[in-house]
Structures are given as structure tokens and as C-alpha cells.
């Protein structure tokens, strides 16, 4: 029986989605951090659950060929990197398999293979943001799965300047230090949580130690320099506030966005909805290529930044809404928005059925799903696939070298439904095809559009059906028949017919 404290000699078979080596003892999977596939190692069991167990590495007997010397003094202690002991090329292969496995096992896409994984040329000091914690004795990172502070003087994936800042700040009684560096200007923002701390002394110490610090916050208050720093991505300048989400690896983010936009296939006739837009990074890149962009994001401050960023870059075809996607997306779609392309870039927990259901109802030509969590990506891709979309391409981008995290972009294309397949054979131009997909704007969409554009005017489904028929759009029989066989059929008055005709034009149904 496998038990806590038992020791075993095992061969590691593969690496799990959270970067732990996997072996089997008596048929049970055992997860061992900091091991590599092919390692022959001694391990000690630390935890036994019903279905699996966990262990720690005690001795490497024969190292795997995938191994390399981890060039960081705190690797294995700080809880940050989990794959630094594995050659970078091999890390990329592991991540490719993590995405493939999730899509196959969770999503049920049996033959799924991620087309490419885009690695980092120089996978070091790539993070623009670092959060340090402090206790009575030291400043550092929380160790894996605990709140014990591992002292840190430098982090090999973070900015070099962090070392100077930590040094300057260690004399203060702080609990948290957050640094963010702009890779384009070199400017650094420092946010400190500390009670009973003199703002002037803190400013003098930090700005004196590191000349690149251009903004300091103490307990949420801007005590020195500017309130935000700016960075450039894909030729667009972004203003970043302390609480706004900004991708942590700007070098790879440019590659990620380029891939997302390539998949989006935008042109100047298209409307794009960018859901979970943060400070509008993808939205503004897309705005340059599309007719119009609608960005949606829950953090108000991020939307303020997004609007500010649009102005800063003289982009006028982007609108932003600060609300939960699950509320605003259904509302926008109901009010008649018809996006040609939807981009989704949700947090780790993924999207939700309300948001995705509305996206499906709006029938965009393409959905580009950007994900930092293959498991929720697979779940949501399944939902979209069951709703009439085909997973057509996927690429992974390594935004987080030396960790097991991976970013994935998936392109989903709409399958034509029966009626459309019939129509589409007669429509050959690209523009015609795009117009054709709007044949199915719902009665609800038409009603909402009319109410909004005609001062609250109400039109019945019967009137819509009659007007559609006048324009040669074949309708289902029963809409035209009165409910009671004997009653007179009301006829659509001219002003309502006008409004409905306008709506049909808006939805490009005529
Ligand atoms: N596309 C952006 C941000 C992606 S991160 C970029 O590349 O920078 C995910 C974003 O989703 C975060 O900004 C987070 O604040 C936002 N978010 C989280 N839950 C949300 C919800 N329910 N509705 C809308 N946005 C949400």
C-alpha cells in the first residue's frame, strides 16, 4: 500500500498540466514536482488521496535527457517557476501536449492538434510585473501552496531593477511590493502596502535607489510621479494603471495579438466585439483593421484606461463598456449589434454560458478565443462547437517560459445551417456570403432595433412577417395566420412597414 513517508525508486513518465512529473506506483498516479520525463529518481510520498498521490524528489539516480541546469538560485523554493530544470525546447513540447490533451480529453475534440507553438527567443527577464510579499524578517515570494515568505534578492524572470528596489525598501515595514516596468520606455511603477510609513521617506529611498522609478503608490495612493505608466504594443501606446490587467510578457504578447488578429481576418467593413478587453489592447489593435470595435470589460478603471488609450492613439472607431460580459453581451446582442468577428480573452476561469450563448445567437462569422487556461478553453470550445462552430485552427504562444502556463489562440468558424447552405450556393461573392448570414436576424433583434431607432415603436411578429414577405423573404406559414381561424388578419400600417424595412436593411436582409 502506498503511504505517506514511503520511499520509492521510480521512472518519471511525463509532465502534468501543472508542471509536475508523473509516475505510477501500484497503478496509482503520483505527482512529483521538479522532475522530468525519463528521470530515474528516488521520491518520498507526501500525500495520498483517493485517486492519486503526491511526492517529493529526494535523489536523482539517472537524469532525463530533457534536463538542464536551472540557472536561478531560488528555483524549487519560491513557488514561481516549475519547469526551469527542463530544456526550453522541451518545455515548449510539454506545453503543446498540455493544450492537445485538454482539447482532446475535456473538449472531446478527438483529433485536435495545436498547429504551432511560438516560443520566446530569449526566455529570460520577460515579466514586466512582479509581486513580492514580506513578513517580519524578509521580502520575497510565497513558497508553493503556502504563505511562507521565501527571501528573494532577485527573480530571474523579472526586471533587473527589482533587486535595487527590494534593497531600498527592506528597511520599511511593508507587507506587499508590486512593481511594473514598461518595456518600451524603461519606466517603472512601484506600489507598496505598508502601515505607518512616511511617504516622503519611502519616495526618497525608492526613487534614490532606482532612477527608472517614475511612479510610486503607497496603500493605493499615488505619492510620487505619474499615476500611470505607458507601454507600447503592436505600435499602439497603452496607459496602464496599477489595478489594470496588462499581459506580463510584452515581447510574446505582440506575437499573441498578431496571431489573434491573423485568425480574426479583419477588414474595414467588419464590426468586432472584444470581450474581456482589459485596457483595450486587442480592441485597439483590431480597430486599426476593422470598421468598428466594441470592447467589454468588468474593471471600470481598465475601461477608463481603454477610452484614454483610444484617444491617446487617435482611434475613434472603438467603444467600450464597463460591465460583466454575462450582462452586457446579451444586452448588446439583443439591441441589435451584429459582430462579424468576436474575440474572447477571458480570465483563467473561462467564459460562461450566458456570454457564449449570446455570442452564438449573434452568429459571427468567426470567433477567436484567446485563453490562458487550456482546460476552460476546451470546455468553452466544446460549447461553441455544439452551438454551430468548427474549431478550424489553433496556435499556442509561450508567454510564461519556465512555468507550465501557456496561452492558446483558437479560431472557430461558423458552420452554415441548412437554409443557408441552400442559399449560399447561389451567392458567390465574399460580400454576399457575409450578408447572407444575416438572413436569420431574429424577431427580437428586429423589434429591439426598431424600438431603439424609432422612439420606442413596437411592431408585432406578424407585421415583421408581412413586411419580410413583401420583400420576397420567405416566411414560416404560421406567422401569417391569425391564431383564431375566423378573425380578420390585421395589416401592417405604412409607418411600421417603413421602420421594419429599415431594420431589414440594417441587418442586410434586403
Ligand atoms: N484582453 C486583455 C485582457 C485579458 S485578461 C489583454 O490581453 O490584455 C481577462 C480580463 O477579463 C481582465 O481584464 C479581467 O478584468 C476581465 N474580466 C474578468 N471577469 C470578467 C467578466 N465577468 N466580464 C468582463 N470582463 C471580465
Image (cartoon, rainbow, N blue to C red):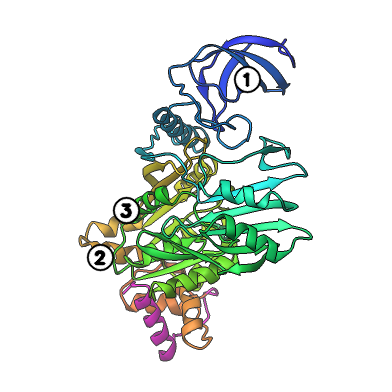
Q: Mark 3 falls on what kind of element?
A: helix
Task: Check if mark 3's residue and mark 1's residue have beta carbons within 8 Å.
Answer: no
Relative placement, left or right, of 84 versus 286 is right
Residue 70: x, y in percent? 50, 27
Q: Does the segment drawn in magenta span residue 482?
A: no
| Mark drawn on residue 30 | 1
Residue at left 53%, top 53%? 346
Write down the quadrant of residue 183 in the picture.
bottom left
Label 3 or label 1, whichever comes before in sequence order: 1
Residue 1: x, y in percent? 72, 10
Relative placement, left or right, of 204 versus 120 is right
| Residue depth check, mark 2 versus mark 3: number of the one nearer the observer | 3
Write down the quadrant of residue 227 in the picture.
bottom right
> For the C terminus, which image quadrant?
bottom left
For residue 374, above or below residue 282: above
Q: Mark 2 falls on what kind of element?
A: helix
| Residue depth check, mark 1 versus mark 2: number of the one nearer the observer | 1
Classed neighbour count for the residue bearing mark 2: other residues with Cα under 10 Å, few (<14), some (14–19), many (≥20): few
| Mark drawn on residue 262 | 3
Residue 289: x, y in percent? 31, 65
Residue beneath disc 2? 432
Label 1 or label 2, whichever comes before in sequence order: 1
Start and end of the magenta stretch? 483-510
Q: What distance separates the C-alpha of mark 3 from that of mark 1? A: 41 Å
Write down the quadrant of residue 76 in the picture.
top right
Q: What distance separates the C-alpha of mark 1 from that of mark 2? A: 56 Å
**Residue 282 visible in the snapshot:** yes
Residue at left 50%, top 26%? 85
Which residue is more in the foreground, 453 or 226?
A: 226
Classed neighbour count for the residue bearing mark 3: other residues with Cα under 10 Å, few (<14), some (14–19), many (≥20): few
Amino acid at each position: 500500500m502506498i503511504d505517506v513517508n514511503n520511499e520509492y525508486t521510480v521512472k518519471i513518465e511525463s509532465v502534468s498540466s501543472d508542471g509536475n512529473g508523473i509516475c505510477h506506483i501500484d497503478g496509482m498516479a503520483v505527482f512529483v514536482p521538479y522532475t522530468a520525463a525519463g528521470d530515474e529518481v528516488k521520491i518520498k510520498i507526501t500525500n495520498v488521496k483517493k485517486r492519486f498521490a503526491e511526492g517529493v524528489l529526494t535523489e536523482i539516480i539517472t537524469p532525463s535527457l530533457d534536463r538542464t541546469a536551472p540557472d536561478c538560485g531560488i528555483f524549487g523554493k519560491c513557488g514561481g517557476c516549475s519547469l526551469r530544470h527542463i530544456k526550453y525546447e522541451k518545455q515548449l513540447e510539454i506545453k503543446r501536449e498540455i493544450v492537445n490533451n485538454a482539447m482532446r480529453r475535456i473538449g472531446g475534440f478527438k483529433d485536435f492538434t495545436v498547429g504551432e507553438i511560438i516560443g520566446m527567443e530569449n526566455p529570460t527577464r520577460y515579466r514586466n510585473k512582479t509581486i513580492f510579499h514580506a513578513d517580519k524578517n524578509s521580502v520575497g515570494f510565497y513558497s508553493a501552496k503556502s504563505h511562507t515568505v521565501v527571501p528573494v534578492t532577485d527573480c530571474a524572470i523579472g526586471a533587473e531593477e527589482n533587486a535595487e528596489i527590494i534593497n531600498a525598501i527592506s528597511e520599511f515595514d511593508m507587507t506587499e511590493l508590486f512593481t511594473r516596468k514598461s518595456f518600451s520606455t524603461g519606466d517603472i511603477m512601484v506600489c507598496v502596502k505598508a502601515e505607518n510609513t512616511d511617504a516622503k521617506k519611502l519616495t526618497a529611498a525608492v526613487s534614490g535607489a532606482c532612477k527608472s522609478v517614475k511612479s510610486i503608490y503607497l496603500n493605493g495612493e499615488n505619492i510620487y510621479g505619474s499615476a500611470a505608466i505607458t507601454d507600447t504594443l503592436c505600435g499602439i501606446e497603452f496607459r496602464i494603471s496599477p489595478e489594470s490587467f496588462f499581459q506580463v510578457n510584452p515581447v510574446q504578447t505582440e506575437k499573441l495579438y498578431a496571431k489573434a488578429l491573423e485568425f480574426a481576418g479583419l477588414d474595414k467593413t467588419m464590426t468586432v466585439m472584444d470581450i474581456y478587453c482589459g485596457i483595450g489592447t486587442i480592441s485597439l489593435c483590431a480597430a486599426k483593421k476593422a470598421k468598428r470595435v466594441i470592447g467589454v470589460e468588468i474593471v471600470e478603471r481598465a475601461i477608463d484606461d481603454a477610452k484614454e488609450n483610444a484617444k491617446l492613439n487617435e482611434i475613434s472607431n472603438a467603444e467600450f463598456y464597463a460591465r460583466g460580459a454575462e450582462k452586457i453581451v446579451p444586452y448588446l446582442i439583443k439591441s441589435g449589434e451584429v459582430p462579424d468577428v468576436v474575440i474572447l480573452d477571458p480570465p483563467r476561469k473561462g467564459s460562461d454560458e450566458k456570454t457564449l450563448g449570446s455570442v452564438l445567437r449573434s452568429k459571427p462569422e468567426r470567433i477567436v478565443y484567446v485563453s490562458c487556461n487550456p482546460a476552460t478553453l476546451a470546455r468553452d470550445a466544446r460549447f461553441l462547437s455544439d452551438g454551430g462552430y468548427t474549431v478550424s485552427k489553433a496556435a499556442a504562444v509561450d508567454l510564461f517560459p519556465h512555468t507550465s502556463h501557456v496561452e492558446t489562440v483558437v479560431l472557430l468558424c461558423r458552420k452554415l445551417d441548412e437554409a443557408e447552405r441552400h442559399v449560399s450556393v447561389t451567392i458567390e461573392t465574399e460580400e454576399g456570403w457575409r450578408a447572407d448570414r444575416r438572413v436569420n436576424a431574429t424577431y427580437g433583434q428586429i423589434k429591439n432595433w426598431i424600438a431603439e431607432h424609432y422612439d420606442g415603436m413596437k411592431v408585432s411578429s406578424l407585421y415583421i412577417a408581412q413586411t419580410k414577405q413583401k420583400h420576397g423573404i420567405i416566411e414560416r406559414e404560421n406567422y401569417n395566420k391569425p391564431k383564431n381561424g375566423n378573425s380578420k388578419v390585421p395589416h401592417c400600417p405604412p409607418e411600421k412597414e417603413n421602420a421594419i424595412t429599415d431594420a431589414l436593411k440594417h441587418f442586410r436582409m434586403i
